[in-house]
Amino acid sequence: MDYSTLKSVLEGILFVTGEEGISAKTIAEVVEVDADVVLNVLRDLQKDYTKKGRGLRVAEVAGGYRLTTVPEHAPYFEKLAFSPSRSALSQASLETLSIIAYRQPITRVEIEEIRGVKADRAIHTLVAKDLIEEKGRADAVGRPILYGTTKAFLDYFGLSGIKALPEPSTLDGDDELEERTKLLFERVEGRQLSMEDMERELETS
């Protein structure tokens, strides 16, 4: 593998590993190149990003390397995160929201036990969109945060209250979660369609 290709591969590896990062040793094992060579390429990437004024940086954190954003750009990312126009919810966020809506108040650990995957990012997204909020602390070891839905959640889904949540048929486990998520998705999709229809009516009237 030539140097240019190796550099490109390393950049891709950093992107794929995300926030977790990866050590130079692990990268070396993956690309089958000496660790010292990998370190040199990583340092070269660091210089490239800085020299060219790119929006990303290669950062060394806790013995590993990962792609990060430029600290000075943080205000723009915060503005993006709280932008009302970013109303679409990912499948992971919608599943997490479904669990919280139907089983609140509930802790992050309980959510993760139901979904089988980490929920930190989805919870952060939902809090940022004001769809969920802290409802106190659980009476358990570490006093974990309890999450529940907000008034904005009711407005978002056009509900008069939590009791107005659409009820799925009698299912268990993953099937129940899937149907509840589908019901929420269909509800918000229906509201968006209705608003679009209303706008079209106003335009033609």
Image (cartoon, grey):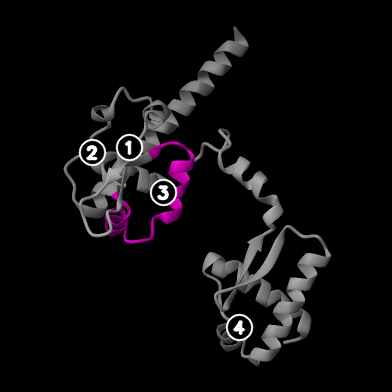
Q: CA distance from mark 2 to mark 3?
A: 23 Å
Q: Are marks 2 and 3 in contact (CB under 8 Å)?
A: no
What residue do we see at 57% from left, 68% from top?
16
Q: Does residue 118 belong to the magenta stretch?
A: yes
Which residue ends up furthest to the top in the rendered image?
A: 205
Residue at screen point 32% across, 57% down: 112
Residues tagged 1 and 4 counted as in contact (Cβ below 8 A): no
Q: Main secondary structure of the magenta part?
A: helix
Residue 79 vs residue 169: left or right? Answer: right
Kindly report which numbered mark, 4 or 2, lies closer to the viewer in this rendering.
4
Residue 168 is labelled as 2
Q: Is residue 127 left or right of residue 102?
A: right
Nearer the camera: disc 1 or disc 3: 3
Element type where label 4 sits in the image: helix
Please tell me the numbered disc located at residue 123: 3
Q: Which residue in the protein does label 1 denote?
A: 183
Q: Earlier in the sequence, mark 1 or mark 4?
A: 4
Provide the secondary structure element on which disc 3 rests: helix
Mark 3 burial class by Cα count in 10 Å: few <14, some 14-19, many 20+ = many
Alpha carbons under labels 2 and 1: distance apart: 8 Å
- Inspect the image, locate mark 2, and give the three-letter code of the amino acid beneath it: Pro
Q: Are marks 2 and 1 in contact (CB under 8 Å)?
A: yes
Q: Which residues are magenta?
A: 107-132
- Write down the residue under mark 4: 24
Q: Residues within 10 Å of mark 1 (few under 14, many from 20)?
A: some
